[in-house]
Image (cartoon, rainbow, N blue to C red):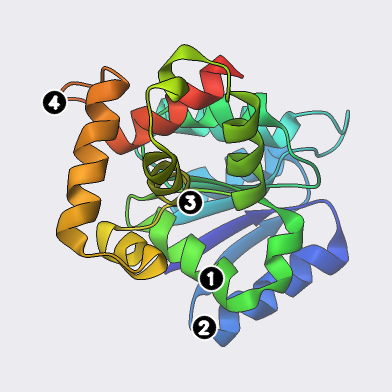
Amino acid sequence: MRVVIAEDSVLLREGLSQILARFDHEVVAAVADAPGLAGAVAEQEPDIVVTDVRMPPGFRDEGLRAALALRGERPGLPVLVLSQYVEQSYAADLLQTGGAVGYLLKDRVGEVTEFVEALVEVAGGGTVIDPDVVRGLLARRAGDAPIERLTPREREVLALMAEGRSNGAIARALVVSEAAVIKHVGSIFTKLDLHQTPDDHRRVLAVLTHLRAG
């Protein structure tokens, strides 16, 4: 897999490059700012972009805005965003662009295998949201009407869905059958008024519903 990294910290940039190389992924460019990211993607046409939210010159949301712009130019370009802190609005902005996106706290990079699995999941078209972000979102929306419709088990399933887990993985985590998970997922879609359409990814929309409410 060909990867472009955008991270202003030299140590983290080099660390990410070494981690990915260990798992046989090729870092085709590693840059330190948003303009460099745009140029690297145009030149290298990577399979996925890994970018920090905050980068020079303003150290605000330059990396995120660059990622959103790239997604606008190249719909479906897989993007995994790294952040030092939980920024729920950033995750919401990213999810609104569709699937093949991820939002992780930088602490997750230290959990090497999980980080690489998240990268592969996003590159394959999946959606991965940091568990800490998911937990915060679900807790904050305990009083929101859509959440009140869900049972405690459905909330557990939704939290795992939002982490990018497949139905099989959710079944293993909750020690239930995959058929039971499929039933819970269908109930979640119904209670959140997410109807089947050819153009929408309901698993992403389920998470996006929570993010927008936040």
Badge 3 vs badge 1, beta-carbon distance below 8 Å: no
Badge 4 vs badge 3, beta-carbon distance below 8 Å: no
Q: Which residue is mark 4?
A: 196
The amino acid pointed to by label 1 is Val
Q: Which residue is mark 3?
A: 163
Image quadrant in which you'd find residue 173: bottom left
Q: Nearer the viewer, mark 1 or mark 2?
A: 1
214 over 153 or under it: above or below: above
Task: Tell me which numbered mark, 1 or 2, is placed earlier along the sequence.
Answer: 2
The amino acid pointed to by label 2 is Phe
Name the quarter where the N terminus is drawn: bottom left
Helix, strand or loop status at disc 4: loop
Helix, strand or loop status at disc 2: loop
State the CA–CA distance, disc 4 to disc 3.
Answer: 21 Å
The amino acid pointed to by label 4 is Gln
Number of other residues with Cα within 10 Å of mark 2, as a class: few under 14, some 14 to 19, many 20 or more: few
Number of other residues with Cα within 10 Å of mark 1, as a class: few under 14, some 14 to 19, many 20 or more: some
Helix, strand or loop status at disc 1: helix
Rendered image: mark on residue 116: 1
Badge 2 vs badge 3, beta-carbon distance below 8 Å: no
